[in-house]
Amino acid sequence: MLARSRSIKVLDFAMQGISGTPCCEMFVEALGLKTLFSAFMGKAKKQKNPLATTPASEDATHVLGIISSLFSNIPSDSTARVRLLTKFVESDYEKVDRLLEIRESAEARLAVTNKEIEQERREMIADGEEIGPEDEDRWYLRKVDGGLFTLQTADYILGWICMEDDGVRGHAQLILGRKGKGLKDIVKVLKEFHENVSEEPTDLPRESEDAMDTSDGPSASKSKAPDGSGGLSQKAILEGLISFLETC
């Protein structure tokens, strides 16, 4: 189990950025999606010694990171990307349900973290202490560790799959609606994500940039990094997802 957790962590970092594109493609070609989504669904073998394991939440975060990188790096309309998207369509959208469960759990953890931060904020104000930028930065990092990062990654993936498949989008809207939520809640999370990322280009492959160009909303592929490079900035990718979801 420990070896599996380490492997997941290594894969997560290896697949990030443009340098991770070959790794992403090789991963799919080597039939890695089956093992990845088995872990994603929580179907991996249970650890005999529960004391010698990495927390499941950490594994889940890295699994989400891998899936996020796959969507960012695998060319649109390629066989590999179709296979990736098919994972979310098969078995009556069970993986979409799982992704929404992870989202709900992260949202609940974040709510607790936000409550604690607001309590600290009130206490500082009551004591006459000045709240500075360093306090805001510290609290934001706590939010990231307290569920925000997982929530943002889950919604980033949801944004991609909702944009690329009408059936997935309809199913996600149905399940979210049962909880009194909707795509607007995903948009809200992605907007906060957008506000806190840099303008640096991610060097997203041209084929994946084309996937952002849809007739349903403004194309992120038309918003280049400020330095004029060909790659999309993370902000531009998020802008494309947000623009599409806002039209749904």
Image (cartoon, grey):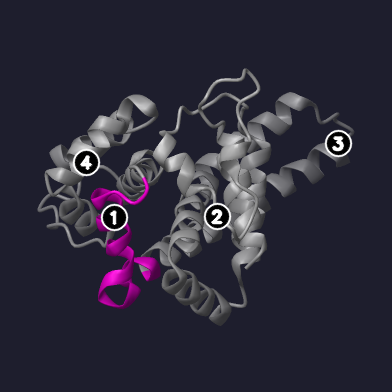
**How many numbered dots are placed on residues in this image?**
4
Q: CB atoms at circles 2 and 3 under 8 Å apart?
A: no
Query: Label 3: which residue?
Result: 127
Looking at the rendered image, the disc whose residue lies closer to the viewer, 4 or 1, is 1
Q: CB atoms at circles 2 and 1 under 8 Å apart?
A: no
Query: Between disc 4 and disc 2, whose residue precedes?
Result: 4
Looking at the rendered image, the disc whose residue lies closer to the viewer, 4 or 2, is 2
Q: CA distance from mark 2 to mark 1?
A: 19 Å
Residue type at mark 4 is Ser
The secondary structure that most of the magenta stretch takes on is helix
- Label 1's element? helix
- Label 3's element? loop
Which segment did they paint magenta? 76-97
Q: Quadrant of residue 90?
A: bottom left
Residue type at mark 3 is Asp
- Label 2's element? loop
Query: Between disc 4 and disc 3, whose residue precedes?
Result: 4
Query: Between disc 2 and disc 3, whose residue precedes?
Result: 3
Q: Is residue 57 left or right of residue 106?
A: left
Q: Is residue 125 visible?
A: yes
The numbered disc on residue 84 is 1
Query: Label 4: which residue?
Result: 5
Q: Nearer the viewer, residue 121 or 86?
A: 86
Query: Label 2: which residue?
Result: 214
Q: Where does residue 227 sit, x and y in percent of width and height?
A: 62, 17
Q: CA distance from mark 4 to mark 2?
A: 37 Å
Quarter of the picture containing the C terminus is: bottom right
